[in-house]
Amino acid sequence: MPIARFLGCFLCGKDKGVGVVEDGDVPVIRIEGKSAHHQLSDSSFDSELEFSSAKDEKDTPLSTDTEPRRTNKALVVAAKGTYALVDHEFPNLEHGREVVIRNMATGLNPIDFKSVDFNFCLPEFPWVTGREMAGVVEVVGEEVEGIRVGDRVWTSTYYRDRRAGCFQQFVTVPAHTVLPLPSNLSFDEAACLGVAALTAAMTLWRWLQVPMVPPAERTGREYLLVWGGSTVTGQFAIQIAARCGLDVIAVTSAKTRSLAESLGARVVVRDGKSNDEIVDEIRGVAGEDITRAIDLVGPSTANYCLKAFSRDEGRKCLFAPLAMISSKAEIPANVVVETVEMKQFVLDGESRRFAVELNRLVESGEILLPGLEVLEGGLGVVVVVEGLERLKRGDMVGRKMVVRMES
Ligand SMILES: NC(=O)c1ccc[n+]([C@@H]2O[C@H](COP(=O)([O-])OP(=O)(O)OC[C@H]3O[C@@H](n4cnc5c(N)ncnc54)[C@H](OP(=O)(O)O)[C@@H]3O)[C@@H](O)[C@H]2O)c1
C-alpha cells in the first residue's frame, strides 16, 4: 500500500511524550513537538514512489510468475519526527560490488535520535536511519570476492544511501564494508561494532595517530583523556588505547567508575565537581602528559578537554571532539582538532584495515564488548522509538542497546 494512503488521515493523539497510533498492522509514531502529520499531503510522499514497492496496484504489471514478490520491511522516518513501518521492494544492486545482508540485529546510537529530533542526515522523506547491524549475506554482487551467500557478517553504514539504513530487513552496502562476524560473537553482540567500536578504533588509529601495533618499548609517558569514559564509544577507546601503549584517564560518574577502571583507565569521578575542578584533578594526575583527547559528551566538556591538554608548547596534541565542539572554542596553539568522519569507512576502501584489526582484537578477547540490553520485537515502531527514548535519557550505565530482528 502506498505510504501516503495510510499516513495522510490520522494521528491526532495527545501531545505528551511519544504518540503511537495503530492502524491495522501499520503503526505510525510521532515524537513530541515534532509532528508534521498535519502538514502531510499526498504530494509529501512523491519521493516514496521511487523507493517503495508501493506503486499503485493499477500500475503494477500482472505477473505471470508464481513466486511471491519479495519485500523488505523498513522502519522509515516518514516525515519530520514521524516514523512508519512499511513494506518496500526487495533491494536491487546498483553495481557488482555490493552485498545485501539479511538483518539479524541492529545497534541503537545517539545519532539515530539526534538526526530525527534535529532533522539532519535525512536527505529526504521517507528515509531509513540506523548505522550498524549484523546479519546473514543474502545476495552477493558478481564482482565481489571472499563473501558468500549465508556468511555471518557485520557492517557500518553511511546515511546517504537509503538502502544502507539499518532499520530495515535487508541492508545493501559496498562489499568492502562487510566484515565476518568474529567467531566468538552472536549477532546481537556484533551489532555494536559498526558505530562505537569502529569509531573508537578509527579515531585512535587514523585521526589521533596511535600506532596500531604497540611499541616494544615506551619512550615516555603519554596520556589519552576520554571525557565520557563509560559511554559505549569510550569503553572501546579506553581498551584500544591502553592496548596500544597509552595511559588513559577517563571522566565518569561514580556509578560507572569501576567499569572504566576495569577496562584500563585511571578515573576522575565527576559527581559534585565543577568542570574546572575536574580539569585540575586530571592535570594533577597527568601533569603535562595529556597529548590526545576524545570528548564524548558535548561542546562544554570539549572546551574543558582543551584546558586539560599539555601546555608544553613543544608537545603537539591531537583532539577528537566526537560530540561536537563550538566554532568559538579557543584552541591552544599546540592542539590540532581533528574532524572525525566515519563516512570515510565507506568512501575510502583503505579504512577497511581498521575494521579488520578491530575484528581480530575482539575475536582474540583482547577487547571486551559492553554489556548488552537486547530489545525483542524487531523493527516495531514502538520497540525502536522507545529504545531511542531510553538512550536519550542516558540511563544505560554503560550498556549498549541492540534491537534483535524477528526471524
Ligand atoms: N562522530 C561520530 O562519528 C560519533 C560516533 C560515535 C559516537 N558519537 C557521539 O559520542 C557520544 C557518545 O556516544 P555513545 O553511543 O558512546 O554514548 P552512550 O553510550 O549512549 O553514552 C551514555 C553515557 O554517557 C555518560 N555521560 C553522560 N554525561 C556525562 C558527562 N557529563 N561526563 C561524562 N560522561 C557522561 C553516562 O555515563 P555516566 O553518567 O555513568 O558517566 C552514560 O552512560 C554521543 O554524543 C554520540 O553522538 C559520535
Image (cartoon, grey):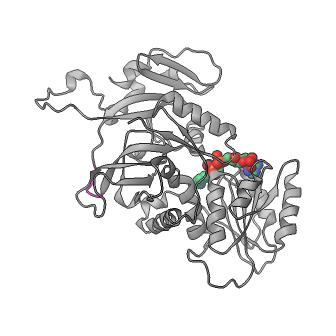
Q: Between 148 and 54, which is closer to the camera in this rendering?
A: 148
Question: In this rendering, is residue 22 above or below 394?
Answer: above
Quadrant the C terminus occupies: top left
Q: Is residue 329 above or below residue 38?
A: below
Q: Position of residue 250 (x, y in %)?
A: 75, 60
Identify the image quadrant of the N terminus.
top left
Left or right relative to 137: residue 81: right
Residue 312, magenta (yes or no): no
First to last magenta residue range: 93-97
Is 148 in front, or is 202? 148
Q: Position of residue 298 (x, y in %)?
A: 71, 50
Q: Nearer the viewer, residue 138 or 164?
A: 138
Find the residue positioned furthest to the left: 64
Instruction: Work out whether residue 328 can be spotted.
Output: no
Position in image of residue 177 (x %, y %)? 41, 58
What percent of the width, then of the height, locates residue 295?
Answer: 70, 57
**Which residue appears at 38% of the width and 25% of the height?**
3
The answer to whether 209 is drawn above or below residue 158 in the figure is: below
Residue 174 occupies quadrant: bottom left
Q: Main secondary structure of the magenta part?
A: loop
| For residue 127, side relative to residue 310 (left or right) | left
Q: Residue at x 43, y 54 (%)?
A: 155
Q: Residue at x 51, y 66 (%)?
A: 364
Q: Is residue 97 left or right of residue 113?
A: left
Residue 34 in sight from this viewpoint: yes
Left or right, 298 with respect to 95, comes to right
**Residue 95 part of the magenta segment:** yes
